[in-house]
Image (tube, rainbow, N blue to C red):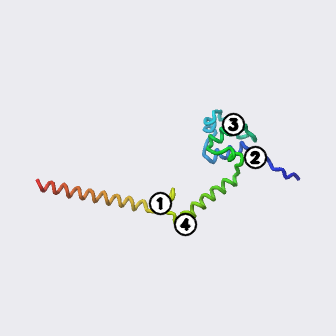
Amino acid sequence: MSTATKPKHIGRNISRIRELKGMKQEILANAIGVSQQSVSNIEASETIDKDKLIEIAKALGVTVEAIENFSEESVFNYFNTYYDTKDSVINAGNLCSANNCTFNPLDKVVELYERLVQAEKEKVEYLEKLLKGK
């Protein structure tokens, strides 16, 4: 039995990264200046020219090393770690988070509405005083 490891399939890695980013082959093709069929051929290739790989990495917004070392497991580990870390920061009492409010947005709307109503009441009182003065 041979324990030799199978070489990484660079084209498949490019395809998976492109799909994870929600990018179609046509968009990648336009970004690197080739046809959609060429991208399809690239994604079917086990190895890719280094210069072309650099162009593709730039278009995908990743490093060449990320393409070469891509694995499904690392993606799942990244996302699991990201969400675990995010939750632990929030649970640790961090009041500022990119996507989580520490206040009820509806309370803010009600507060704004009450201020507008108060301003209108003051305006009405002022206008009534002006009318009584004439």
Q: Residues within 10 Å of mark 2 (few under 14, many from 20)?
A: some
Q: Residue at x 70, y 55 (%)?
A: 73
Q: Secondary structure beneath disc 4?
A: loop
* Mark pair 3, 2: CA separation: 17 Å
Q: Which mark is residue 101?
A: 1
Badges 4 and 1: C-beta atoms under 8 Å apart? no
Question: Would you name the residue on which mark 4 appears?
Answer: 92
| Dot placed on the residue nearer the N-terminal end, 4 or 3 | 3
Q: Nearest to the eye among marks 3 and 2: give it.
A: 3
Question: Would you name the residue on which mark 3 appears?
Answer: 52
| Dot placed on the residue nearer the N-terminal end, 3 or 2 | 2
* Mark pair 4, 1: CA separation: 15 Å
Q: Residue at x 66, y 55 (%)?
A: 76
Three-letter code, disc 2: Lys
* Among the 4 quarters of the image, the one containing residue 78: bottom right
Q: Give the percent coordinates (x, y) of residue 111.
A: 35, 61
* Mark pair 2, 1: CA separation: 43 Å
Question: Would you name the residue on which mark 2 appears?
Answer: 8
Q: Give the percent coordinates (x, y) of residue 63.
A: 66, 45
Q: Residue at x 41, y 60 (%)?
A: 106
* Mark pair 3, 1: CA separation: 44 Å
| Left or right, 128 with reference to 17 | left
* Among the 4 quarters of the image, the one containing residue 133: bottom left
* Among the 4 quarters of the image, the one containing residue 60: top right
Badges 2 and 4: C-beta atoms under 8 Å apart? no
Q: Say if 7 sits above or below 123 in the image.
A: above
